[in-house]
């Protein structure tokens, strides 16, 4: 485990060096949040939702945009190229488990991107005029559960991303697979449309899958749109899904590496 933590620290330091990209992404997420809030304000003038109030939705939007790098399904180009061009052969020569190397690299990239982009947004958003600002947490317990859920969500999303990388062992190319994977994760995770605003059927389907636990749950806990009992239940589900995804991912990777095909030249 020590070597994977060292690799994690190394990738974290490398990712933190891309400050210009982080600043550009921060401004993009900030103005995208403002635009979404204005759209939903117009929506709530016509009809309201029993699942989430406008104030809760505004907090949900701000947090989703602030931590978008953490909850998004953007793939790592370096890992994709490693598999598609055959450079994975060098990784297989190292005395490490390739699944966990990819896992900690993805984890480091998400934490670094989320850290650089979220802090300025979280500082500015609460200072905006009424109707646009980020509200305080629903309560102290909600805030504590939010932090726990966010941490588990990062770990879970890293495991979900590894599913895509494992699939490249079978497809050998991620061009089409990446688009399908991105659409599935983003939709069922509530990134396109908040799950609380979806029809009942789609809500039930989303909550059966692990994507919402990583990209939707932490922000709903913060805003108070779900009860404390439900929050604790879904946090337990986060842990269960994290174990299922990482254990199965490790087993599938080890099995596939026994007859992996190296392409490239």
Image (cartoon, rainbow, N blue to C red):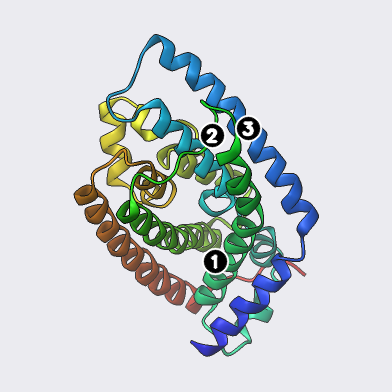
The residue nearer to you, when weighing 56 against 233, is 56
Question: How would you rate the neighbour count of disc 2 (Cα within 10 Å): few for under 14, some for 14-19, many for 20 or more?
Answer: some
Residue at point 19% right, 50% down? Answer: 229
Quadrant position of residue 251: bottom left
Q: CA distance from mark 3 to mark 2?
A: 14 Å
Q: Residue furthest top?
A: 46
Spot occupied by residue 139 in the image (x, y as percentages of width and height)? 33, 49
Say which residue appears at 27% left-offset and 51% top-offset.
231
Q: Which residue is mark 2?
A: 133
Residue 198 or residue 122, whichever sits in front: 122
Give how far across and how far down residue 90 sits, in percent: 68, 80
Q: Nearer the viewer, mark 3 or mark 2?
A: 2
Number of numbered discs present?
Answer: 3
The relative height of residue 123 versus residue 149 in the rendered view (above or below) is: above
The image shows residue 194, relative to residue 39, as above or below, that is: below
Residue visible at 58% across and 63% down in the picture: 111
> Residue placed at 31% from the left, 65% from the top?
244
Q: x, y percentage for residue 182?
A: 53, 44
The crowd level at tag 3 (other Cα within 10 Å; few <14, some 14-19, many 20+) is some
How much space separates mark 1 and mark 2, taking CA atoms?
A: 29 Å
Q: Earlier in the sequence, mark 3 or mark 2?
A: 3
- Foreground disc of the pair 1, 2: 2
What secondary structure is marked by label 2? loop
Farthest left residue?
A: 229
Q: CA distance from mark 3 to mark 1?
A: 25 Å
* Residue placed under numbered mark 1 in the picture: 107
């Amino acid at each position: 485990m020590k070597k994977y933590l060292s690799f994690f620290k190394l990738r974290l330091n490398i990712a933190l060096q891309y400050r210009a990209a982080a600043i550009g992404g921060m401004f993009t997420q900030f103005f995208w949040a403002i635009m979404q809030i204005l759209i939903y304000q117009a929506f709530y003038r016509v009809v309201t939702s029993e699942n989430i109030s406008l104030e809760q939705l505004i907090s949900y939007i701000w947090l989703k945009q602030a931590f978008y790098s953490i909850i998004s399904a953007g793939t790592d180009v370096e890992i994709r190229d490693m598999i598609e061009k055959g450079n994975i052969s060098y990784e297989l020569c190292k005395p490490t488990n390739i699944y966990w190397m990819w896992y900690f690299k993805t984890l480091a990239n998400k934490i670094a991107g989320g850290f650089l982009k979220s802090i300025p947004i979280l500082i500015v958003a609460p200072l905006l005029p009424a109707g646009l600002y980020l509200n305080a947490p629903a309560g102290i317990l909600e805030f504590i559960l939010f932090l726990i859920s966010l941490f588990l969500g990062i770990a879970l999303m890293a495991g979900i991303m590894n599913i895509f990388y494992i699939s490249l062992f079978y497809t050998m190319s991620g061009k089409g697979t990446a688009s399908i994977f991105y659409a599935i994760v983003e939709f069922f995770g509530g990134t396109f449309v908040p799950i609380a605003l979806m029809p009942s059927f789609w809500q039930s389907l989303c909550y059966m899958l692990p994507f919402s636990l990583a990209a939707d749950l932490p922000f709903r806990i913060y805003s108070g749109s779900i009860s404390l009992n439900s929050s604790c239940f879904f946090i337990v589900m986060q842990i269960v899904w994290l174990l299922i995804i990482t254990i199965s991912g490790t087993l599938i990777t080890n099995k596939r590496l026994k007859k992996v095909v190296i392409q490239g030249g």
